[in-house]
Amino acid sequence: MTDPQVRTALLEYVTAGEPPLGLTMDGVVRAGRRSRRIRRVLWGGGTFGLSAAIVLASSLLTGGSPVPTIPAPGSTAQVRAPDAATCEELRTTPITANATDQERADRMSCYLLAAVPAALPGASFADNPARKAPFLVAAPGSGGMPDGLSATATVSTSEGDGLVIFEVGRSKPLTEGEKIGHCDKADCLVGPHGEHIEVFDFGADPATGAHGVTVYVYTANTLVLAGAHNAPEIQNAAPTMPQPPLTIAQLITLATDPGLVLFP
Amino acid sequence: MPRPTGDADFADYFRGRVVPMRRLAYALCGDWHTAEDLVQTAFVALYRNWGGIRPESLDAYARRVLVNTFLSHRRNRRRESVTASLPEAPVIGADPGARIDLGRALAELPPRQRAAVVLRHIEDLPVSEVADILGMAEGTVKSQTARGVEALRHALNPVMEQS
């Protein structure tokens, strides 16, 4: 029996005695809409603070138990902002796989200190009182990811105070199966450079108005997390902003910038 | 090519792909009811992420969801009954005995091997794409497919010899 004969037998097996189709387009769309609603309800309980939500998202993504996310570095002495000359030098030289933790931190800080204020004209930035690092300056050895770096800032606009948070870590490229698994929990997109993007919009809590959004971007061996919350990172802080200070589109733009690909 | 956006695009895609998807699902699971459940799961996942998937990747995405759902379903069932996987509808047409033997032989293949055979020989996918869907090396796909087809041949040969 030849391969074509096996193929013919298989095709006959799946077509002969085929019952009428029970699935309908309307039924699938109804189930799809219900699935979207359920996901929004599951993820829209804005009673989480941003960090709690990120921990939950991280644990779902990695399939492991929640990990402490973005702990403050042990000493402020570890965390310093790079000077302009360092930023200029880094801007003109591509990162290599052998970059040191400090170089990665400097690259991240240089990028965020330029790009985030540009995305939020008129906003002012302050150190996040929950972290021991200057605003938008990356702290090496922090965060819940392998070789993770993190940076945060309290953002103030005429609408109120909010929080932005960025984390970059080492992550092997996702398999297609892993992407599908992740996309059961997140809205997935393809980025401008072909990156795999997962968007978690936690929605506004109807009771408190708290609202956090988080974007994960996978590029090469790098995972970038960018998040925004409409309240500062202070226990039980009531939101004063109607929306997080950065939109999902802005978070995606920031998180897909090649300047944050720190693990090529 | 623009990304698909609304329900109308989804409806067009559904109409064009639901029958071949159900056949693929049936070849994997050997049961039309389960096949429809698998296909519904795949289309619901597709709907949920509609607009975020490149048009040229829609078929691949749908197949991946279908195959992964099938493999998860198999793992969750814990055990497999050969008789439960036989075609439930009366087979009409040429040589029903051959189809029953083929259904039994498919059901006896390990799930991933069965998926490799079905994707290669019913969906006519290249080895590289099957490897991508199943998360296997291309060489493993080739060897698994060859073993699976050999088992099908062995099951069908007596029937073929009689006919």
Image (cartoon, coloured by chain):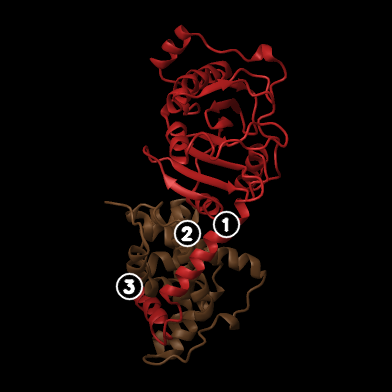
Rendered position, B78 above or below A238:
below
Rendered position, B31 above or below B124:
below
Q: Secondary structure at mark 1?
A: helix
- Which quarter of the image is occupied by the C terminus of chain B? bottom left
Measure the alpha-carbon separation of dots 2 and 3: 38 Å
Measure the alpha-carbon separation of dots 3 and 1: 45 Å
* Image-based side of A186 in relation to A233, left or right: left
> Quick one: label 2, few (<14), some, or many (20+) residues within 10 Å?
many
Chain B shade in the render: brown
Name the image quarter holding residue A128: top right
Task: Specify the subunit that label 2 lies on.
Answer: B
* Image-based side of A19 in relation to A170, left or right: left
Chain A shade in the render: red
Task: Say which residue label 1 marks.
Answer: A39
Q: Nearer the viewer, residue A237 or A34?
A: A237
Task: Say which residue label 3 marks.
Answer: A4
| Residue drawn 43% across the image and 62% down it | B62
Q: Are marks 2 and 3 in contact (CB under 8 Å)?
A: no
Q: Are marks 1 and 2 in contact (CB under 8 Å)?
A: yes
Task: Say which residue label 2 marks.
Answer: B48
Task: Specify the subunit that label 1 lies on.
Answer: A
Amino acid at dot 1: Arg
> Quick one: label 1, few (<14), some, or many (20+) residues within 10 Å?
some
Q: Secondary structure at mark 3?
A: helix
Tell me where residue A261 appears, x and y as whole percent: 47, 29
Q: Secondary structure at mark 2?
A: helix
